[in-house]
Amino acid sequence: MKANHFFSATDNERIASTIQAVEAKTAGEIAVMVQDSSDRYPLSLLLSGLCFGGLLALLVCDLFFQASLWLYPPLTILCTLLTAPIIKRLPSLHRAFIPASELDQRVEIRAALAFYQKGLHQTRDRSGVLFFFSLFERKVWVIADQGIYEKISQEELQGYSKTIVAGIKNGQAAEALCAEIRRCGELLAHHFPIRAGDTNELTNEVIVS
């Protein structure tokens, strides 16, 4: 599923309303972003293409060319070029060739880049919190600005992602997200209570990147 269709119109309204209600009690600012993928993973695509392309080339050589070793290398290249685009359209198969640690790292890096590219670091009190969805990796990363990290650790923030990921698997992504936004809001309200003159500095709408 693509990022612009991940949440329905009703889901988007519910998420925006939840953020608005939470921010009425805290100086913290919450944003939600959904992205198709955090990287193209070209090396893993090449590896998977070579793996399946090599097997296909071996089968073709055995069935049609009397297992000719001379034809195997060029057939492997041809079959790799044919299978790689197919694998790219099969996320579950493509992910199988990417180490879990690399998926985590790419999502974390992309979340940090998106945080700054979208200007989420420009709040008055450096109090932005981003719930970042990366669909290909099936991961959620929670990242915050400097002001938040002075009181709340990354481990605490990232703890909200586990429930959200479970909700995605159960087909209840919006419900799980809203529940964790409210939980995060309680923590923010404790450390960053609402102040006089506070304004809504970040959009409450889901950002699709």
Image (cartoon, rainbow, N blue to C red):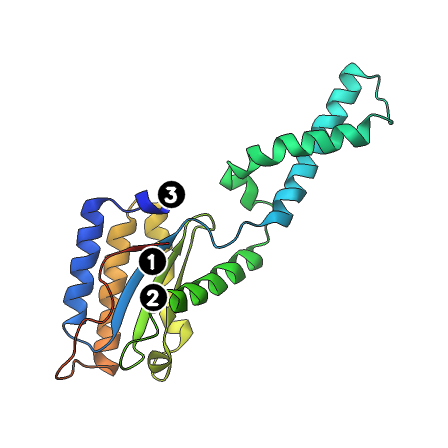
Q: Position of residue 86 (x, y in %)?
A: 56, 32
* Quarter that holds the N terminus: top left
Cβ atoms at labels 1 and 2 below 8 Å apart: yes
* Image quadrant where residue 132 sits: bottom left
- Residue shown at the point (13%, 82%) measured from the top left: 197
Q: Which residue is mark 3?
A: 2
**What distance separates the C-alpha of mark 1 from that of mark 2?**
7 Å
Disc 1 packing (10 Å; few <14; some 14–19; many ≥20): many
> Considering depth in this image, is 26 or 125 the residue closer to the camera?
125
* Rendered view: 74 above or below 67: below
Q: Which residue is mark 2?
A: 130
Query: Which residue sits furthest top?
Result: 64
Question: What label sits on residue 53 in the rendered view?
Answer: none
Q: Position of residue 17 (x, y in %)?
A: 15, 59
**What kind of element bears circle 1?**
strand
Q: Which residue is mark 1?
A: 33
**What kind of element bears circle 2?**
strand
Q: Earlier in the sequence, mark 2 or mark 3?
A: 3
Disc 2 packing (10 Å; few <14; some 14–19; many ≥20): many
Left or right relative to 146: residue 106: right
* Rendered view: 206 above or below 46: below
Q: Is residue 7 visible?
A: yes
Q: Position of residue 117 (x, y in %)?
A: 40, 65
* Image quadrant where residue 93 sits: top right
Q: Earlier in the sequence, mark 1 or mark 3?
A: 3
Q: Earlier in the sequence, mark 1 or mark 2?
A: 1
Type of residue at label 1?
A: Met
Left or right relative to 90: residue 166: left
